[in-house]
Image: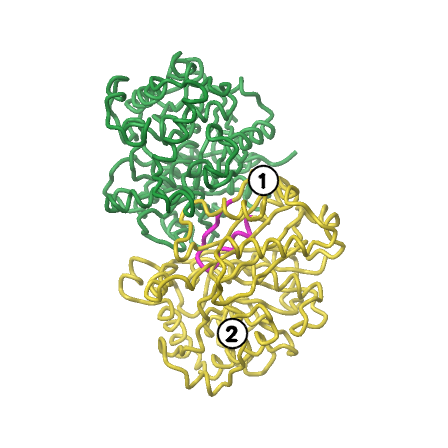
Chain colours: A green, B yellow
Amino acid sequence: MRRRAAVVGAGHTRFGALNESPRELLRAAVDQAYGSVDKGLTPLDIGEGFLGTLGFSGWQLGNASAVLAEEARITGAPVTRVENACASAGFALRSGILAIESGARDLILVAGVEKMTDAPSRRRRYWLGVSGDTEWERMAGLTFAGVYGLMASAHMREHGTPVEALAEVAVKNHANALKNPNAHLRKAISREEVLASPLVADPLRLFDCCPVSDGAAALLLAGEDVAHRFTDTPVLIAGAGAGSDALALQDRRSMTRLAATRRAADEAFQRAGVERSDVDFLEVHDCFTIAELLALEDLGFAAPGGAAALELSGATRLGGERPVNPDGGLKAKGHPIGATGASQAYEAFVQLRGSAGDRQVRGAETALAHNVGGSGASATVTLFSVG
Amino acid sequence: MRRRAAVVGAGHTRFGALNESPRELLRAAVDQAYGSVDKGLTPLDIGEGFLGTLGFSGWQLGNASAVLAEEARITGAPVTRVENACASAGFALRSGILAIESGARDLILVAGVEKMTDAPSRRRRYWLGVSGDTEWERMAGLTFAGVYGLMASAHMREHGTPVEALAEVAVKNHANALKNPNAHLRKAISREEVLASPLVADPLRLFDCCPVSDGAAALLLAGEDVAHRFTDTPVLIAGAGAGSDALALQDRRSMTRLAATRRAADEAFQRAGVERSDVDFLEVHDCFTIAELLALEDLGFAAPGGAAALELSGATRLGGERPVNPDGGLKAKGHPIGATGASQAYEAFVQLRGSAGDRQVRGAETALAHNVGGSGASATVTLFSVG
């Protein structure tokens, strides 16, 4: 029986166009995580740290891990920077889980941060392409919205997916973000507004795209055998999985399935020993509205082509059968690249402790978090359950 | 008793100013590692991968891990990019060890790569500073050689360290590199030539500095319980340690000690249960000649200020009492940033299997590898022993 990890504390800054530097964002998220530990802890208890960040805007291109160590007051302890594009914090969380499972450490700090809005707007566009393939996609002029636009077009052609289903994802996630004080876009939108918004990369419109955000999130992981030292209500990491896929779309077997997500999900469910039907809500990687449909299908919550009807049925809304992205998702909560995977785990933590306020998923006992790198070259899936 | 990791295969490209792309370098190192596995393996046996790279010259700024997956033909399996500046591969190796120790995987691929010589020379200088502190060092105009020049000056002031000891490090490592067909600088130099070479950052001269190199290295790690499936002569990872320190020199307690190295070494020796006196040779992080002196002192093989006499005595030469950097070190073998930590482990592997050719350390049974990120903000120490 392997040793499992549990979340014993978590912190989250506001997401948005913020004045704070990456250092300040990390400090705020970590301090909030420290403060959330019911029985208290000192930074010296932490054996190791993992930082997820793309390093967008170049604030510290090498050794950014040392900045996390400084702001968390754990300098001395090893800290590793992990970068798998938009799944950087998902993979940092994975590394933290492995360190707990190895028995080498009892308490681990995982954090994610990104500062995006201080890059000039032309550079933002350039940088956003860096997580796709350089040789075949970026050098051919394909933007990141363009990559997902191709996937959306293919999905529509194969499955007859209506644009209304894409719009519904945006409407739902904006509605959820209104209930999340940390969300970037706190503005209700209608399906008509989405469908009338400017075209960005056919068929994706402005309101199909997540915003460019700043923010940070932090998690404290303990071995399940020592978690009680820190809290009486830990959130267990029941199982974790990860996978990879070809970097360029053209090298993949399908443009409408993310093989990395499917592999990650199969591994996480197998390791956790739970069923899809046990999952009460999902945090999925909706960088574009189409990505939420792909996620539901690849994670096994809808048949291929079946996610559109699921979204249109209302089952994925707060109060529905199985809510998806109760925090507003990347789409409306915001997507500070390196922070997103930690932000999803933060949501699982507060929801499963019943402390999610207005957006609480009633009676939630099991949650799934799904983080995708770039256009699907990497993915993590993590299952959380009440301790 | 924790499960330990063993190296069952390793590969290494030539280091130098090469024509190959990062993809080609990774492919070559991985293919050589595959070919080195005595009993053979298929890429499908590999459960997970870790890639160390700084991403110098920007060839793939996000999701470079997917490129390793493609070139190693393991797409599907999770691959994580790890970046801790010049210790990127040391920390990638550490992550691989944790994954083996956790029991989650039986066989792991660890690789490191850097392509540096295709950046324009002004950009090279700019980029080399990125692993030091941005806010206080880089923005004040401090170069990377400048940071180590400050450390060398302080060491001379505190301990009376003679420039001849620095020069001896260069002379020795150049002599060793002559015996390493993969080395970048294969040219014998004299102490007089070092001392007459142009001043770069007082007291460091041109021949005190490692070159800017391209290259890759790859390692295959297995659980010690399954290593026999792949080879009858695995090299055991007896223990590993890591540490961090403040990013900026001004924030450290000492300018002549690297606290991250000391912490990493103490942890590695404690976990391995071996003594300093058991170590037959060392691979240490000599990005500048002063760094080899600091390493010997911080690793506990010389008292503070004592490394100069040790180097001048000849004890660290091939054939000496305890050789240091038999492969030529970063100084003469070359330092493709993200590859270096894997290259050091490659040297431990071939030496402990008795297959290091002209540079073989006779009878070597225990080796230490030491990898430093930037100017010491992060460090790993790994102890290897015959299986």
Using the rendered view, name the quadrant where residue B283 is placed. bottom right
- A297 relative position to A329: left or right: right
What subunit carries mark 2?
Answer: B
Report x, y in % for residue A103. Answer: 59, 43
Quadrant containing the N terminus of chain A is: top right
Q: Is residue B242 magenta?
A: no
Look at mark 2 in the image and give the residue it sits on: B185
Disc 1 crowd rating (10 Å Cα; few below 14, some 14-19, many 20+) is many
Of the pair B314 and B59, the residue shown nearer to us: B59
Look at mark 1 in the image and give the residue it sits on: A101
Report x, y in % for residue A201. Answer: 31, 32
SS assignment at label 1: helix
- B214 relative position to A286: left or right: right
Task: Report, in whole angstroms, how far the alpha carbon at label 2 lies from the one at label 1.
Answer: 43 Å
Report x, y in % for residue B20. Answer: 50, 59
Regarding residue B90, the answer to whether it shows in the image is no
Report x, y in % for residue A312. Answer: 38, 14
Q: Does the magenta stretch include residue B88?
A: yes
Picture layout, residue A29 above or below residue B170: above
Regarding residue A291, the answer to whether it shows in the image is yes
Residue farthest bottom in this picture: B192
Q: Which of marks 2 and 1 is in front?
A: 2
Residue at left offset 27%, top offset 22%: A194
From which residue to which does the magenta span run?
B80-95
Picture layout, residue A212 above or below residue A265: below
Amino acid type, label 2: Leu
What subunit carries mark 1?
Answer: A
Residue at left offset 49%, top offset 46%: B65
Picture layout, residue B311 above or below residue A71: below
Disc 2 crowd rating (10 Å Cα; few below 14, some 14-19, many 20+) is many
